[in-house]
Image (cartoon, rainbow, N blue to C red):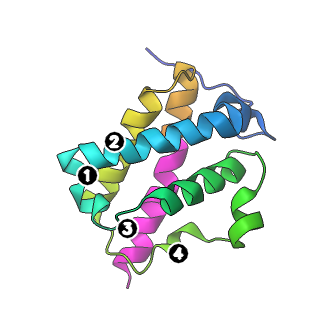
Amino acid sequence: MIIKNDSRYGVADYSYKMAGELPGITKLVKDFYHTMNSLSEANIIRNMHPNDLSESEKKLTYFLSGWLGGPKLYAKHYGSINIPLSHKHLKVGIEETKAWLLCMKKSVDNQPYESDFKIYLMEQLSVPAERIRVVSSNQ
């Protein structure tokens, strides 16, 4: 079965709205970190984070808000960001990328998003995940 993605995804704030705006993104991020804490396959990336995940949750929520076309909260609170370069200090290989995408997929699947938006979102999230891996491997 082929699902045709809504052509409005990625235009203006449409994706932000489809994600449930800031409350929906916050829920996604909390679910993501809960999944990362509970999956043994995610230990490899959990160990890259501090014990207290509250700042990581805030940063990812703020980043996704702007990345999805909503308010640029990350830039407002932390300044501009280059996702691959900001992760360059970490050793991110194929296994780490797979673990991150697995946690995000499980979290996206738990959200009340339309199925085609879930597919679109995972396709889009795989791009920065891969760029992080490439930059990290070129250290």
Q: Which residue is mark 2?
A: 35
The magenta span reads 123-139
- In the image, farthest residue toward the top: 1
Residue type at numbered disc 4: Ser
Determine the CA span between mark 4 and mark 1: 20 Å
Residue 23 coordinates in the image, percent (x, y): 65, 35
Residue at 25% over, 51% down: 42
- Camera-near label (2 vs 4) is 2
- Camera-near label (3 vs 4) is 3
Q: Which residue is mark 4?
A: 86
Residue 122 is left or right of residue 137, and the answer is right
Find residue 82 and report its image quarter: bottom right
Determine the CA span between mark 1 and mark 3: 14 Å
- Determine whether 10 is above or below 62 in the image: above
Q: Which residue is mark 1?
A: 42
Q: Quarter of the image for the C terminus: give it.
A: bottom left
Q: Do the CB atoms of the residues marked 2 and 1 lie less than 8 Å apart?
A: yes
**Majority secondary structure in the magenta region:** helix
Residue at 23% over, 44% down: 39
Q: Which residue is mark 3?
A: 50
